[in-house]
Amino acid sequence: MANDINNAAQVVGYSYVSGDSTFHAIIWDDGMATDLGTLGGSRSEAHAINDAGLVVGWASTAAEVHATL
């Protein structure tokens, strides 16, 4: 699911992990999707991207959820 796009046409959001019910933050850039991972937990999500390519969102650890940049 896409959440934001910048002027360079980079898109951020999240995608479900193949064969699993968890999801990870993703950046789509020039037709390629890159998994941004987590902080050791099972889930993350990218909410916004600026024109410098900085992405904000959240990611989980084993016990907590943290804001990410």
Image (cartoon, rainbow, N blue to C red):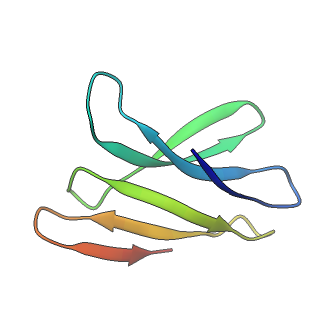
In the displayed structure, 63 sits above or below 22; it is: below
Residue extending furthest toward the right: 7
Q: Is residue 24 left or right of residue 2?
A: left
Residue extending furthest toward the bottom: 67
- Corner quadrant of residue 44: bottom left
In the displayed structure, 19 sits above or below 21; it is: above
| Residue at figure coordinates x 21%, y 56% from the top left | 40
| Residue at figure coordinates x 75%, y 50% from the top left | 10
| Residue at figure coordinates x 45%, y 58% from the top left | 45
Q: Position of residue 5 (x, y in %)?
A: 76, 57
**Front residue of 31 and 21:** 21
Q: Is residue 40 left or right of residue 53?
A: left
In the displayed structure, 12 sits above or below 63; it is: above
Q: Position of residue 47 (x, y in %)?
A: 57, 65
Q: Quadrant of the N terminus?
A: top right
Q: Position of residue 7 (x, y in %)?
A: 89, 60
Q: Is residue 9 left or right of residue 28?
A: right
